[in-house]
């Protein structure tokens, strides 16, 4: 894996991912259409790319988008995904809703954080109220490869 296209890079989840990927050596192409998101990326020294620019030769597409927008966005660039590309969803809702392209030449990966207040007994008071994790509470994550029945 050499190149990542991050869709929704300037949004709530996208900025968290952007901040972490800026600490790596991966080639990341940040896609963001909203002006507030583009400004947030610019404040980090990142220039937003178009979908076409981001997808050319990329290995992984991360969908940091609201679930109800994923189908619409992905349908606009499905034809640009080359065989072997990993399509990564950050929640199971869109894949289970059937809005990802059904292609047997793509790899599908679904990941989602576990809410720490539900899955682990935190002792620290700040951690007990860090419902989304990653700030004060330890964050676990569920990861899964997904297979579409393309028949």
Image (cartoon, grey):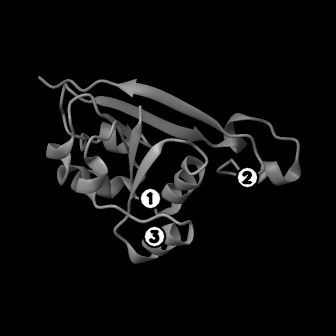
Question: Dot 3: few (<14), some (14–19), or many (≥20) neighbours within 10 Å?
Answer: many
Q: Which residue is mark 1?
A: 9
Q: Tell me where residue 61 sits by quadrant.
A: top left
- Residue 48, position as x, y percentages in the image: 39, 64
- Residue 44, position as x, y percentages in the image: 56, 66
Q: Which mark is residue 37?
A: 3
**Which sits earlier in the primary sequence, circle 1 or circle 2?**
1
Q: Which residue is mark 2?
A: 135
Q: Are marks 1 and 3 in contact (CB under 8 Å)?
A: yes
Q: CA distance from mark 1 to mark 2?
A: 20 Å
124 or 77, which is in the foreground?
77
Q: Are marks 2 and 3 in contact (CB under 8 Å)?
A: no
Q: Residue at the location (14% across, 44% down)? A: 79
34 or 114, which is in the foreground?
34
What kind of element bears circle 2?
loop
- Screen quadrant of the N terminus: top left
- Residue 117, position as x, y percentages in the image: 71, 44
Q: CA distance from mark 2 to mark 3?
A: 22 Å
Q: Residue at the location (53% across, 66% down)? A: 45
Q: Which mark is residue 119?
A: none
127 or 103, which is in the foreground?
103
**Which sits earlier in the primary sequence, circle 1 or circle 3?**
1
**Of discs 2 and 3, which sits in the foreground?**
3
């Amino acid at each position: 894996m050499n190149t990542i296209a991050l869709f929704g890079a300037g949004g709530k989840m996208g900025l968290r991912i952007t901040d972490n990927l800026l600490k790596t050596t991966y080639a990341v192409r940040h896609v963001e259409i909203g002006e507030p998101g583009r400004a947030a990326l610019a404040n980090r020294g990142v220039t937003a790319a178009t979908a076409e620019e981001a997808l050319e030769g990329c290995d992984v597409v991360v969908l940091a988008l609201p679930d109800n927008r994923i189908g619409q966005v992905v349908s606009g660039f499905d034809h640009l995904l080359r065989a072997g590309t990993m399509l990564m969803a950050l929640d199971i809702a869109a894949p289970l809703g059937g809005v990802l392209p059904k292609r047997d030449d793509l790899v599908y990966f679904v990941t989602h954080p576990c809410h720490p207040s539900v899955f682990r007994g935190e002792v620290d008071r700040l951690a007990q109220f860090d419902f989304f994790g990653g700030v004060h509470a330890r964050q676990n994550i569920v990861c899964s490869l997904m297979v579409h029945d393309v028949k």
